Image: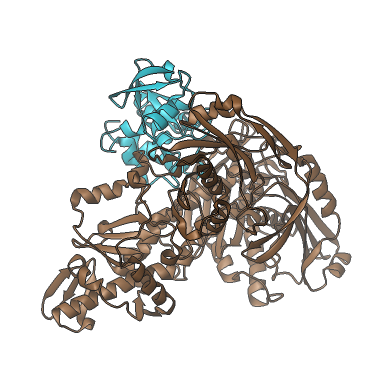
């Protein structure tokens, strides 16, 4: 066990955990931010996607000891009032069915639009291919990403 | 207006009112932290100072805000929006004044809280509207009493009561305190479909804001003071059970509290149809955090032993049934050869019309084709989980499950406590698709909590979830068609079976449309457990039948849609047999609608199109699927879909579900497969089990509903089964080769 000081959603958090503990479980069990989901534990489904700096990463494969000074953003911290353009587009298109994968989808989509504000269909498909939606909302996810891309201030 | 005696409902309401008289009984509020974003938005406006309970489904605040308790658990069909819409429509309240709360499990107040079998909306269609209409009538009566005017002269609309002659007006909130004291009316009047103002108009998902902001909603998200995390270790193979465990090394690791064994059923307990459980004896490991428990789980030293064969009587929906569970370690290769052997022998004849034997004997040509599909795992995105806190003879449970009432007796028996002492909340499920109808994991959570004397959350790893059983069975079907010298279809024969159940529906189309028809079935016992999976039998039979009919039409030189319509015309005008369980007109209706909307052309050489239609769960669905081959891989360009499920409550949400069903069907048709070697599932996570991803999803989906005023029927399942046939038929057009074995893509080389 060791103490780790983490910057999550702009706040400082201190946790005392084994250094191998993945950020997924640090977030869910220790910091009680449960918006980041457990789906597979092997970086195959994308439900646990968070931002490390500006990049989308699978938090189930990110040991707490590898984070250091880098800032982590989770779905809870993507925007203050749930009004990030991607979140707004998700509401406009009414994307979710069960909703379990959607936090991961939104974190992947928002990272994509940050580095590529006007992605093509192929670029969207490539960036989102690591996120499984068992309910099959892919057509709406793609539409929502395009909606967000066409809005301002992505 | 439809007058409806409250007859059945009245008793329920009286009972409910008395139950609720001591204030709102909502069990315990384990999901308090899960207050929705919707509630927060209303709170910003103004929450009422006082609530008045009208019946178990709704209460009205003194400021006119209405809380509707939605009775059925949610797993993504958006019933937490559509069910309250039914109440709000008849109450005639502004939708923006409605707050939705999930009802806990409470059979007396909420009836059969079953989400599955596509029966949610159809089962709640009248009761929920009645709940709204009853409250509205009581509000009108309260205004009549207060204003001393005849109640017939009072209107109630959008949350406002008015009396035109005296120009009196009051919000529902102002009359709620009086209304709540009145006698429940003997009779209620329900609106005509044409008068709906809310229903049949798309409303946004009430939980969408909570979902996109990552609020705790799911069973997996529950956190309670003092809660420990539990995981289970089940046998690595079907056909094995627990022999012994050495948990010392695991217990020595940091954060680990205990290693225990549990037994899910008391000896001699008579199981229900949803008590399915291949692994009733388990090892459980309990600790402070999920990661610590996951690490310690690897250190468990468990010995397993073979099960012995047994028979048991199950009290299911269809009465008592005896099933045989064989011993042994089963493999897919053996299943395949067993299925082929049985398919070659006479089966049990379930239906026979005319004289099929003679028709086949006299046939000029016979077309015979066999179809098969593997076991499928549900792979819900949220792995199985449950919270339980058993203290003494009381249990508090939060269970993301589809049928709470059917697991309560088992929990009570296994814990040795009265049923009445179990409180159960119903958090949102991260997917269900039939899997979470089988709530063995809730029994496990309760037993673990009882053993370790602490509140626990049981969490299945993805691997535990995928290898635990309750799969869509593996099936096989052989179809034969007889043709005379003029190439007319003279007889049809289907023989179908599976491990361990038969997928056959002998009285479905094309039964009733063919003079000489025979349906046979067979089964092979297995110790691999199976269960509901988005219409498990239908989703195989639809694929086989619709692919075969496509080939029959081709053999006869007929257009694929017109051929089906001709058969349906025959079934309507001069049906063969009397037990045909479909409405030929509505069946033809979806085919005609999909033909129009897809701009279907006979012998269209410009597109690789497949058509398919099916009836199940009282609804009709047809798809036209366009596919092309790209670098040896099939790409679905567009799917046009037509559905007849009667009145559509929330059109955009229903469209979303149809889009999902189509994507799910394509994924399973292309990739879905679970195989076994010596009882061991050969896939345990998504690196091995291929799920459809965005790249493989259809580029475009276009959903249409038949407009009618028929009482609503199922929506969750019906659009799913016909996808398999549409994929098979389009794949044939794109590749020139018929595909008979699912999955169509995984492990195969497809030449385009």
The answer to whether residue A92 of the structure is visible from this angle is no
**Image quarter (top left, top right, bottom left or bottom right) of the C terminus of chain A:** top left
Asked whether, in this view, residue B195 is left or right of residue B715, the answer is left
Q: Nearer the viewer, residue A37 or B287?
A: B287
Q: Nearer the viewer, residue A109 or B81?
A: B81
Q: Residue A137 placed where, x, y %?
A: 47, 44
Q: Residue B485 placed where, x, y %?
A: 84, 65
Which residue appears farthest toward the front when viewing the image? B392
- What number of labels is visible? 0
The answer to whether residue A52 of the structure is visible from this angle is yes
**The chain in brown:** B
**Image quarter (top left, top right, bottom left or bottom right) of the N terminus of chain A:** top left
Q: Nearer the viewer, residue B99 or B497?
A: B99
Which residue appears farthest toward the left when viewing the image? B166
Say which colour chain A has.
cyan
Q: Nearer the viewer, residue B684 or A118?
A: B684
Asked whether, in this view, residue B81 is left or right of residue B606, the answer is left
Residue A53 against residue B373 in the figure, above or below? above
In which quarter of the view is residue A110 placed?
Answer: top left
Identity of the residue drawn at 50% across and 43% down: B449
Q: Residue A68 placed where, x, y %?
A: 37, 15
* Snapshot colouring: by chain
Which residue appears farthest toward the bottom when viewing the image? B150
Asked whether, in this view, residue B99 is left or right of residue B654, the answer is left
In which quarter of the view is residue B351 placed?
Answer: bottom right
Q: Residue B376 placed where, x, y %?
A: 64, 44
């Amino acid at each position: 066990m060791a103490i780790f000081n983490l910057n999550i959603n702009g706040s400082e958090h201190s946790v005392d955990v084994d250094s191998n503990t993945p950020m997924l479980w640090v977030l869910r069990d220790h910091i009680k931010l449960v918006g980041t989901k457990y789906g597979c534990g092997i970086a195959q489904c994308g439900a646990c996607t968070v931002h490390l700096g500006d990049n989308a990463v699978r938090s189930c494969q990110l040991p707490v000891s590898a984070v250091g000074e880098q800032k982590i953003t989770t779905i809870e911290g993507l925007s203050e009032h749930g009004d990030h353009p991607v979140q707004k587009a998700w509401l406009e298109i009414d994307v979710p069915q069960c909703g379990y994968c959607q936090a991961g989808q939104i974190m992947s989509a928002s990272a994509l639009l940050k580095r590529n504000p006007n992605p093509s269909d192929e670029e969207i498909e490539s960036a989102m291919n690591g996120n499984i939606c068992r309910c099959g909302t892919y057509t709406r996810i793609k539409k929502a990403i395009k909606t967000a891309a066409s809005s301002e201030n992505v | 207006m439809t007058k409806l005696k409250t007859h059945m409902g009245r008793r329920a309401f009286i009972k409910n009112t008395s139950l609720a008289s001591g204030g709102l009984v909502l069990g315990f509020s384990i999901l308090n932290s899960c207050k929705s974003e919707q509630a927060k938005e209303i709170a910003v406006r103004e929450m009422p100072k006082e609530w008045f309970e009208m019946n178990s489904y709704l209460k009205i605040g003194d400021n006119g805000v209405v809380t509707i308790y939605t009775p059925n658990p949610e797993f993504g069909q958006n019933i937490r929006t559509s069910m309250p819409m039914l109440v709000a429509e008849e109450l005639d309240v502004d939708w923006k004044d409605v707050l939705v709360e999930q009802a806990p499990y409470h059979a007396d107040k909420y009836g059969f809280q079953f989400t599955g079998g596509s029966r949610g909306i159809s089962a709640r269609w009248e009761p929920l509207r009645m709940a709204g209409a009853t409250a509205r009538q009581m509000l009108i009566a309260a205004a009549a009493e207060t204003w001393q005017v005849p109640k017939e002269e009072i209107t109630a609309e959008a949350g406002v009561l008015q009396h035109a002659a005296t120009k009196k007006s009051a919000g529902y909130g102002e009359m709620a305190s009086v209304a709540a004291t009145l006698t429940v009316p003997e009779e209620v009047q329900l609106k005509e479909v044409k008068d709906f103002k809310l229903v049949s108009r798309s409303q946004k998902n009430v939980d969408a804001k909570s979902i996109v902001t990552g609020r705790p909603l799911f069973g997996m998200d529950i956190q309670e003071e003092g809660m420990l995390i539990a995981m289970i270790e089940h046998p690595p193979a079907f056909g094995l059970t627990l022999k012994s465990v050495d948990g010392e090394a695991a217990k020595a690791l940091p954060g680990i509290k205990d290693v225990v064994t549990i037994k899910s059923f008391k000896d001699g307990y008579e199981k229900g149809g949803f008590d399915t459980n291949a692994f009733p004896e388990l090892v459980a490991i309990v600790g402070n955090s999920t990661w610590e428990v996951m690490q310690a789980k690897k250190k468990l030293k468990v010995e397993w032993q073979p099960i012995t064969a047994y028979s048991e009587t199950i009290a299911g929906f269809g009465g008592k049934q005896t099933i045989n569970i064989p011993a042994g370690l089963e493999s897919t290769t053996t299943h395949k050869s067993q299925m082929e052997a049985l398919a070659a022998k006479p089966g049990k004849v379930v239906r026979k019309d005319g004289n099929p034997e003679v028709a086949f004997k006299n046939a000029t040509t016979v077309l015979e084709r066999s179809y098969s599909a593997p076991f499928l795992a549900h792979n819900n995105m949220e792995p199985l989980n449950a919270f339980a806190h058993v203290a003494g003879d009381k249990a508090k449970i939060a269970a993301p499950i589809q049928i709470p009432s059917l697991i309560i007796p088992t929990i009570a028996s296994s814990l040795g406590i009265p049923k009445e002492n179990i409180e159960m909340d119903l958090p949102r499920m991260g997917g269900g698709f039939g899997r979470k109808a089988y709530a063995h994991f809730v029994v496990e959570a309760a037993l673990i909590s009882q053993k370790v004397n602490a509140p626990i959350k049981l969490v299945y790893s993805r691997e535990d979830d995928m290898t635990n059983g309750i799969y869509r069975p593996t099936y096989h079907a052989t179809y034969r068609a007889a043709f005379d010298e003029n190439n007319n279809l003279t007889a049809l024969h289907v023989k179908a079976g599976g491990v361990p159940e038969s997928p056959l529906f002998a009285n479905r189309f094309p039964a009733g449309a063919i003079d000489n028809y025979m349906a046979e079935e067979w089964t092979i016992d297995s110790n691999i457990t199976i269960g509901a999976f988005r219409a498990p039998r239908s989703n195989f039979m639809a694929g086989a039948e619709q692919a075969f009919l496509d080939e029959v039409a081709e053999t006869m030189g007929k257009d694929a849609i017109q051929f089906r319509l001709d058969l349906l015309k025959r079934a309507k005008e001069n049906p063969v047999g009397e037990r045909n369980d479909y409405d030929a007109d509505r069946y033809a209706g979806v085919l005609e609608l999909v033909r129009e909307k897809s701009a279907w052309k006979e012998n269209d050489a410009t597109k690789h199109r497949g058509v398919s239609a099916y009836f199940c769960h009282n609804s009709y669905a047809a798809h036209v699927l366009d596919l092309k081959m790209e670098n040896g891989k099939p790409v679905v360009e567009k799917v046009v879909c037509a559905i007849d499920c009667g009145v559509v409550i929330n059109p955009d949400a229903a469209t979303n579900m149809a889009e999902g069903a189509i994507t799910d069907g394509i994924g399973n048709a292309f990739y879905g497969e679970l195989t076994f070697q010596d009882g061991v599932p050969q896939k345990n996570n998504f690196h091995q089990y291929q799920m459809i991803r965005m790249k493989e999803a259809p580029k475009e989906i276009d959903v249409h509903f038949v407009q009618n005023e028929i009482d609503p029927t199922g929506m969750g399942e019906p659009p799913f089964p016909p996808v398999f046939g549409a994929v098979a038929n389009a794949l044939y057009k794109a590749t020139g080769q018929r595909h008979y074995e699912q999955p169509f893509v995984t492990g195969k080389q497809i030449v385009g």
